[in-house]
Amino acid sequence: MVKIYIGIGSNIGARRKNIYRAVVQLVLCREFRLLGISPLYETSAVSVAGGTDFLNCAVKAETGLLPEEVLSKLKSIELKLGRKPVPEKRKWAPRIIDLDILLYGRRVIRTGKLTVPHPRMTARKFALKPLLDLDSGMVHPESGMPFRKIYREIRDRSQKIGEYT
């Protein structure tokens, strides 16, 4: 079994409900054993035109799936919850749900379909803050730099990041 961290986000419709439904799907998935879930954070959209602010969180889980199998499982959950496939040029369009593999153990993965650690998470507070809530002592698998140090140095364009209650 390997520990994985999954980022969850939504900025269309009932955002809290969308995230709740995604977490339920992960819980129901026999291939995942959820170990924790971060608080929800509200963040202004960075690269997304239109839509409302995002709600984001992260989950920590264990799985026996290979990284590509995790990706496939997450994409099927997104489709089940109503996310429509979009062309590559619109990959930052508003979305009902977004599930991203942030970390897969301490592995570094670079394939045509998957990059882990998530390639943009070290530039985004909304990805790192929930991750740090789950494990404040983690280090980046490539650089060895503590994520809490990376978080303090991020200069993302988010107008806000705040716990959503």
Image (cartoon, rainbow, N blue to C red):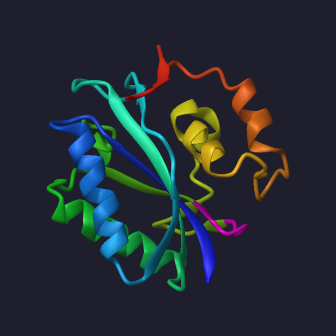
Q: Which residues are magenta?
A: 103-108
Question: Is residue 107 shown in magenta?
Answer: yes
Quick check: 138 above or below 124?
Answer: below
The percent coordinates of residue 142 (x first, y second) are 79, 56
Q: Position of residue 106 (x, y in %)?
A: 73, 67
Q: Position of residue 152 (x, y in %)?
A: 74, 26
Total marks in image? 0
Any part of residue 111 in sight: yes
Question: Can you tell which quarter of the image residue 1 is in?
Answer: bottom right
Question: How far across and how far down the image is residue 56, in percent?
Answer: 41, 39
Front residue of this view, candidates 67 and 113: 67
| Residue occupying the far front of the picture | 165
- The residue lying at 26 percent from left, 34 percent from top is 11
Quadrant hosting residue 31 = bottom left
The reply to whether residue 95 is in sight is no
Q: Which residue is located at x 22 percent, y 24 percent? A: 50
